[in-house]
Structure formats: C-alpha cells, structure tokens
Amino acid sequence: MSTESSKQLVLDKNIKHIAFIMDGNGRWAKRRGMPREYGHKKGADTFRKIVTYCFEAGLQHVTVYAFSTENWKRSEREIRALMRLFTIFIEDAFEDIRKNDVRIVFIGDRSVFREDMQRRMAALERESAANRNILNVALNYGSRSEIVHAVNTLIERGEKKISVEMLNACLYTRLSPDPDLIVRTAGEQRLSNFLLWQAAYSEFYYTDTLWPDMNGEEVDRALLSFGNRQRRFGGIAEGESN
C-alpha cells in the first residue's frame, strides 16, 4: 500500500489510535553477533521512522511501550544504554515536534528518573502541548500500577463511588482514546502489562518481524488486517442473529 492508500484506509475505518509493543531488539542484535545495546539503538531509529509513518498515514494517536516497570530487572549495562537512548530521544524530539506537529506525553512513573531528565521530559511536554497529534511514550510504565494510581487519585479526592469515566480521566493516557489496534512484534502474543484497561475492545496484530526490522509495509499489513475485521464491542455482527 502507498501512504495515500494507508491514509484512505485510516479515514474509511476511522482508525485514530495505534499502539506498539516494540519487542525483539535483543534478538535482532544477537542474530548479528552484537550486544543487546546495539539492537536497542537500531530499534530507536526504527521507532522514529514508524511514528513518522503513522502520523503521515493520518493516525492521530500513537503509543509506544518503551520501558516497562519490569525492565529494571535487566543488566545494569543494558539499563544504562537504554537511559542514554531515552536522553538522546528527548533532545532530538524538540526538533521533531516542530516538524511533525506532535504532542509528546510521557506515561508512567517518571519519579525514578534523574531530576534533569524529569525536567527535560516536562519541558518537552509543555513545548509540544498545543500540537495536534499525540505520541504517548510509555517509560517506567506498568498498566496495573497505572490503574492503582488512578484509583488512589480518586480516593484522595474523597470520591465514594468510582465510574468508568472517572477512572479514565485519571489514567496516564487520558488525552487519547482507547487504542483501536495494538501491534506486537517479534512473535510474542501477550500484553505484558501494557494498556490492560484501555485494550478492552482493541484489535490485536502480531508479527514475527523483530522491531528493528519493522517498516511502513508491516504497518500497512497491520492496518489492512484491522480493516478486514468487524468490530463488535460486545454486540453481534451485522446480519447475524443471537
């Protein structure tokens, strides 16, 4: 599919939000006899290309699972490499947001990061706040923790009863609709504590492609797969009887 065809599909199917579980950086590097950090660097390059492609295709919201609350279990060397990449991303993003009309939102518990990194994250969010497209970057993110955080926020407000709408308004992703499509690379077929609440009616697309090898054609295949499905949201398909 061309970018124009992708745009038409996104428009026809009213696809607003795509989310990515970016898996396979380590395996990509291992197959090439390189350290895992090399795979993460290549994955970071792919991330920028894929996000740009998605917004060019007309998607308005993109969410990426960059670093989970469980990823701290990895080696110190790998974590240091990832933190360096996050710092580079934040610096480069100041230029990217101007080019692509992107609003950056960091979702997750940022209190664990260095204070200077937290300040840069906050500055990037402020500077991009008026932009149209939203990129949610999940850093130190875990969906269970997000839900607990939202509930605790409501308790602290003195709420006696909690509605779905109230909880939605306290989630890290409150600026975006629930994802229409969640894409996971590298052949794994699980959510890994990602957007558990928001994924209630999301469609899923799994590919064996490792994240560093992800490209626009694979995104197109995911969008085509979505376009061929009939979303029921708990109901029945047209023409079917109970």
Image (cartoon, rainbow, N blue to C red):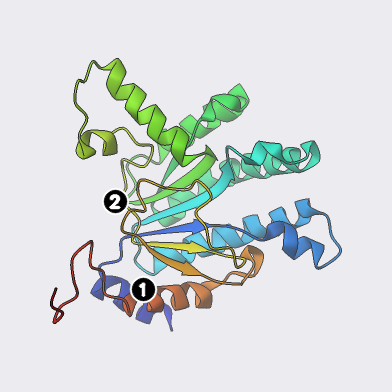
User: Left or right: where does residue 34 sit relative to residue 220?
Assistant: right
In the rendered view of the protein, which quadrant contains the N terminus?
bottom left
**Number of numbered markers:** 2
Vertical placement of 132 versus 145: above or below? Answer: below
- Front position in the image: 19 or 145: 145
Disc 2 secondary structure class: loop
Q: Secondary structure at mark 1?
A: helix
Vertical order, 211 against 216 (above or below): above
Say which of marks 2 and 1 sits in front: 1
Which disc, if any, is residue 177? 2
Work out whether 10 lies above or below 38: below
Quarter of the image with the C terminus in it: bottom left
- Identify which residue is drawn at 67% across, 45% down: 85
Look at label 2 and name its amino acid. Pro
Say whether disc 2 or disc 1 marks the residue closer to the N-terminus: 2
Quarter occupied by residue 43: bottom right
Label 2 Cα neighbours within 10 Å, binned few <14 / some 14-19 / many ≥20: few
Q: Is residue 83 left or right of residue 155?
A: right
Q: Residue at x 54, y 40 (%)?
A: 139
Q: Is residue 112 left or right of residue 62?
A: right
Separation of residues labelled 2 and 1 (CA atoms): 17 Å
- Residue bearing mark 1: 226
User: Where on the picture, by quarter, is residue 62?
Assistant: bottom left
Instruction: Give the x, y percent position of residue 20.
Output: 49, 58
